[in-house]
Image: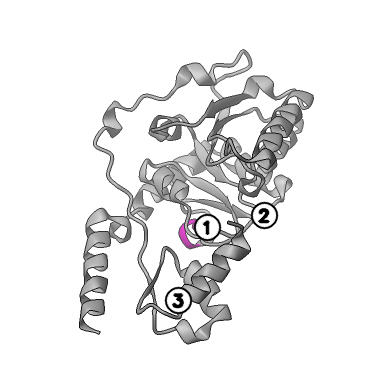
Amino acid sequence: MTRQQDIFVVTRAAKHVTRILTCSKTTAAALLAGHPEFNGLVQVIYNPVRLSTTRACVSPPTACLQSDQSNARDLVVGVVGRVTPQKGQHVVLDAVSELARRGRNVRVVLVGAVDPHSPEDNSYLGSLKSTAKAAGLERQICWAGYQDDPMPFYTACDVVAIPSTVSEGLPMVALEAMRLGVPVIGANVGGIPEIVREGVNGFLFPPRNAVALADCVQRVWDDRGLLVQLKVGALETVDGRFSIENFRADIRRVLADCAQD
């Protein structure tokens, strides 16, 4: 379904429910802006992030990141998600080109794949690879494809970029990255600014603005002490609000309340 169809289905279904659960305050606000009559039904319950029991054993995929041009000053930027125009991978490639013009070497790990049934996605992937080749970025990019377990790729990154060009809820990518102490540089859309705190656990930039993204990456490229501070902030962000225990307790409370209504 298209996004418009999704919204249509949700708003129609909402007229027949006793609770509406959203994964972020931003999502709740977007729904209520158009349908204030749902105010008493909406409740925010954040998606849980499971604790990694294998974190200490995770080793980054160094083979994927090997480059003839790599050195100790290279910064590794990760992008995790479906390869589709709305996720904005092209913004990252443009930002890396801009950084190269400034003399900053950045390597990129692209984790994710296209929807095999989407001609748009497949065309977009071809365009990304053509852009990378034309810009001379081939040696700086790791096309990791779909991964059952992206955690090793998170740990290989200094920062994770979320360059979404359209509004979305609260991306699990942000929570997964920060759970492993990886700061996030995200587009200022949807629920991303709800979790990314400027200068504390990452940075925000205007959507589709590759130069602004490059500026954010350059800040941590130039100041590795700042990067260390952001990593600490990222670890502290994923607190009890995102625990599986709190999620289960919240769901139980909702079900109990609905049973009493």
Main SS class of the magenta portion in the image? loop
The quadrant in which the C terminus is found is bottom left
Is 65 left, or right, of 55 in this rendering?
right
- Residue 58 rendering spot, x and y as whole percentages: 33, 28
Which residue lies under the disc numbered 2? 207
Write the residue at 58% across / 79% down.
Answer: 34
**Mark sitting on residue 192:** 1
Q: Which of 28 and 233 is in front in this view?
A: 28
Residue 89: quadrant of the picture: top right
Q: Do the residues labelled 2 and 1 touch (CB within 8 Å)?
A: no
Residue 92 higher or lower than 239, as above or below: above
Q: Is residue 196 magenta?
A: yes
**Residue numbers of the magenta segment:** 194-198
Distance from Cα at disc 2 to Cα at disc 1: 11 Å
Residue 96 visible in the snapshot: no
Foreground label between 3 and 2: 3
Between discs 1 and 3, the one toward the N terminus: 3
Judging depth in this view, the residue of 111 and 236 nearest the camera is 111
Q: Is residue 148 shown left or right of residue 51?
A: right
Please provide percent x and percent y for residue 114: 58, 36
Residue 97 location in percent, x, y?
A: 73, 33
> For numbered disc 2, what is the local secondary structure?
loop
Q: Of the residues tagged 1 and 3, which is closer to the observer?
A: 3
Badge 2 amino acid: Pro
Can you name the residue that lies furthest to the top here? Answer: 68
Three-letter amino acid code at the position of disc 1: Ile
Q: Give the labeled residue for mark 3.
A: 14
Which type of secondary structure does the marked residue at label 1 adopt? helix
- At 46% from the left and 58% from the top, the residue drawn is 195
Q: Earlier in the sequence, mark 3 or mark 2?
A: 3
Residue at the spot 63% in from the left edge and 57% down from the top edge: 166
